Image (cartoon, rainbow, N blue to C red):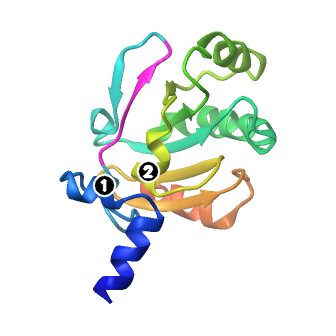
Amino acid sequence: MIRRLAVLATVLGLAPLASCGVEVSNPEIGSPAPAYEASTLDGESVSLKDYRGKVVLLNAWATWCAPCREEIPALQALYEQRRGEGLEVIGVSVDARGEGPTIRRFAAEFGMTFPIWHDPEDRFALTFRTIGVPNTFLIDRDGVIRWRKLGPVDLGDPSLNAALDAALGAEG
C-alpha cells in the first residue's frame, strides 16, 4: 500500500512537495479546506483564512475557458441573490501572469461584481487537487468543504442548493 501511495505521489508530482515538508491534502466534502492564498488584480495578497466565519463559493476559472464563460452569469446571479444571506463568491482566475487587463475586460464584459483573485501559477490546482477549470468549492463558516464541482455551476443543481441552504442556515 505504501509503495502504491509513493507511486501515486510521484505520478501526480507530489513527491518533491512531501519531501520539502509541504502539506499535501485531499480536500473532500466534509474535510477542512486547505490553506490557500492568491492576489487581487491590484497585486494585494488575499487568503481564504480572511474569510473564516463566512460561507464562500470558491470558483477557479480562466478567460479562455468556454465552460467558464457559460457559468459566470450563474455565479453572478447567485452572488446577487444570496450575498445578503452571507454568501461570498470568489472567482480565482488562473490566467497567466500579465493577463490582468484581459481579466479586467472579461470581468467587465460579464458584469462580475464579486471579488476576483489571480493565481497565474495555478496553485489552486495543487492545493485543491483539481484538474482543469471550472472547479468550484463551497466552504462553510467553519472552513469545511460542503460541496464541490468540476465543470460549470448550474443554479438549478439540487445538490448545490441544498449545500448552500445548509451552509447559510436557510430553511430548505
Q: Element at badge 1?
A: helix
Crowdedness near tag 2: few (<14), some (14–19) or many (≥20) residues, C-alpha within 10 Å: some
14 sits to left or right of 84:
left
Marks 2 and 1, how far apart at CA = 13 Å
160 sits to left or right of 41:
right
State the mark number for residue 108. none
Q: Residue 82: image x %, image y %? A: 56, 40
Q: Residue at x 70, y 55 (%)?
A: 151
Span highlighted in magenta in the image:
35-41
Q: Which residue in the protein does label 2 denote? A: 126
Q: In the image, which is nearer the foreground, mark 2 or mark 1?
A: 1
Q: Residue at x 48, y 40 (%)?
A: 85
State the mark number for residue 16. 1
134 sits to left or right of 69:
left
Q: Residue 92: image x %, image y %? A: 53, 34
Task: Please tell me how many numbered marks the rendered image carries.
Answer: 2
Task: Examine the rendered structure and indicate whether residue 102 appears above or below residue 94.
Answer: above
Q: Residue 62: image x %, image y %? A: 67, 34
| View extreme (bottom): residue | 1
In the rendered image, the quadrant that contains the C terminus is bottom right
Q: Residue 147: image x %, image y %? A: 51, 61
Task: Examine the rendered structure and indicate whether residue 43 appears above or below residue 160.
Answer: above
Depth check, front residue: 98 or 34? 98
Callout 1 amino acid: Pro
